[in-house]
Amino acid sequence: MKQAMLIVNPSSGKELGKHYSDHALKTMKEMGYETFLRLTKGEGDAMEFAREACEKRYDFLAAMGGDGTINEAINGMAEQEHRPLFGLIPLGTVNDFARALNIPMKPEEAIEIFKQNHVQKTDVGKINDRYFVNIVAVGALAEASFSTPVEQKSKLGPLAYIIEGMKKMKEKQPFELKVQSEHDWEGEALLMLIALTNSVGGMETIAPEAKVNDGQLHVFIIKDMALPQFLLLLPKILLGELAGSEHVHYMKVTNLQANSTYEMIANVDGDEGDMLPITIENLKQHLDILVPNKK
């Protein structure tokens, strides 16, 4: 019998993880899998469980939770010798990775997707010694996400990130940035975004060109400018026109190094990451993920 693991964060999605795990286990059994359930209790658990699934050479690994749980599971799988087929069931606030893969936001519908057995080869980003699936951001604004209180995320969803971002905007803090890649850039920046997918902070218009399997890092460097000009960029973000602004340097690369004379901390998929310098690369089509069959 094929073997699988289901990782569940019981505290995600207003603590509905346990409720939906029964549905997922039943579905996976119908698909012919002997499934081992793992419940996370704290940070790092999902990563350890995913690594266990790789080491035991399971055929299928499913993760249920928010972006943090999904990200941990992928960090456990990335660059392992054996990487199981992967499925995700979103229970979080924003669910960027699930949105980018067109996976339904309703958990019961996301579970039903498994039965279609439609596989999408998907890129994974690597930053220093860890992995990401959506975005790396650098700048004072980028700290908004990991400084957003958990309670606020739960109550307000994507709006919570915007509120924290608006607070930081008043503190407009340019920093010296040096990027080395196929295309180099150096100057004063307000924010650097490095996107793997088109969904960032619940919005699917920041990097509309980005595809989950294109092997590219989509880099947006927002240059230093007056606050009124910066505010005028917001409509461009909503319209998917950020790359066309004269105040934004946009490039597509496969890897890069970023450095600054300032003490800048990278935001990695919404969580606090490493301090610059950072080295980033795209691991093209690194994971096989179950997604909806559009046919």
Image (spheres, rainbow, N blue to C red):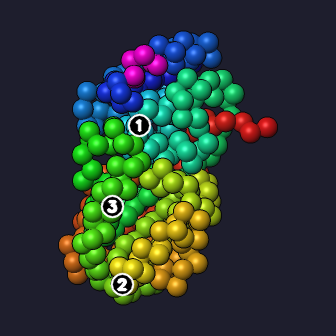
Image spot of residue 178 (x, y percent): 35, 82
Q: Helix, strand or loop at disc 1?
A: loop
Quarter the N terminus occupies: top right
Work out how far the residue at label 2 is from the one at label 3, CA to CA, in angstroms: 17 Å
Disc 2 crowd rating (10 Å Cα; few below 14, some 14-19, many 20+) is: few
Range covered by the magenta-colored residues: 16-21
Q: In the orientation shown, which residue stands out farthest toward the bottom?
A: 187
Vertical order, 112 against 210 (above or below): above
What label does residue 165 carry, if any?
Answer: 3
Up the image or down, 167 lies above or below 199; here it is below
Toward which corner of the image does residue 67 lie, by quadrant?
top left
The furthest residue to the right: 295
Classify residue 12 by image quadrant.
Answer: top left
Q: What residue does disc 2 label?
A: 226
> How far across and down, in percent of the image, does residue 68 sit?
36, 41
Q: Position of residue 162 (x, y in %)?
A: 37, 56
Residue 183 in sight in this render? no
Label 1 sits on residue: 92
| Nearer the observer, 52 or 180 | 180
Image height of 8 relative to 264, above or below: above
Q: Nearer the viewer, mark 3 or mark 1?
A: 3
Q: Is residue 200 left or right of residue 40?
A: right
Q: Residues within 10 Å of mark 3 (few under 14, many from 20)?
A: some
**Sequence-first disc among 3 and 1:** 1
Looking at the picture, which amino acid does disc 1 mark?
Gly
